[in-house]
Amino acid sequence: MYLSKILITGSACRNPYEIHRALWKLFPADAEAARDFLFRVERSDRNHAEVLMQSDRQPETSTDGARILASKEYPLSFQAGQCFRFLLVANPVKTINDEMGRKDAEGETKKCRVPLIREDDQRAWITRKYEIVASLDSLIIDPVLPLRFRKSKEDRAGKIQPVKFQGILTVEKPEAMIELVQNGIGPGKAFGCGLLSLAKA
């Protein structure tokens, strides 16, 4: 596992989907590879985006529009009872039936995701994500500006509503904690959500 700081420049930094595509180019071409990185935009303006990226593979070379500022190994090792400060920008949602009653190819009612807006629902969502893995000792929930994106190939615009969660947790199941960090939390990972950052409390 590696942690890297990446600088994205140009028009890509204004579209989370294009940031995701730019990060892909930092790894060797592999037609069989699945996405094996998570990222979060730490700071951005219209021309620059500083990105924190966690990846299974080490990014190899900078490209036009994406420059590796730093990269280091990030060994994952936890013990039961350890306390960590955590930061997570996530996309808390729930799945509901399509209001129009539309059907999918199998004739089942389509499902759609809707954002959780109320803080009580967001708190319950993150508590479920940590269930068994860790206990939440403190939790602060802050709103984040919506992420607007456009998938150029499909010419389709979209929006997700991230939320910032931070606080202190205590590890209960070390192996499950490793898996949680590796996989990230919640949907929207292609748009910069789900990266769980930890620091010893």
Image (cartoon, rainbow, N blue to C red):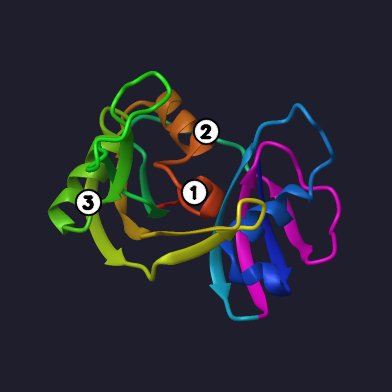
Whole-percent x, y for residue 157 in the image: 51, 60
Does label 3 or label 2 sit earlier along the sequence? 2
Q: Is residue 9 above or below residue 76?
A: below
Q: Residue furthest bottom?
A: 46
Please give the label number shown on residue 152.
none
- Residue beneath the point at 85% across and 60% down: 63
Whole-percent x, y for residue 84 in the image: 38, 48
Q: Which residue is mark 2?
A: 77
Does label 2 or label 1 sit earlier along the sequence? 2
Residue range of the region highlighted in magenta in the rendering: 47-73
Count neighbours of disc 2 (C-alpha within 10 A) and say few if under 14, some if 14 to 19, many if 20 or more. few
Q: Is residue 97 above or below residue 148?
A: above
Q: Is residue 114 magenta?
A: no
Of tags 3 and 2, which is closer to the observer?
A: 3
Left or right: residue 117 versus residue 56 is left
Whole-percent x, y for residue 163 in the image: 33, 59
Frontmost residue, 191 versus 173: 191
Give SS at disc 1.
Answer: loop
Frontmost residue, 158 versus 201: 158
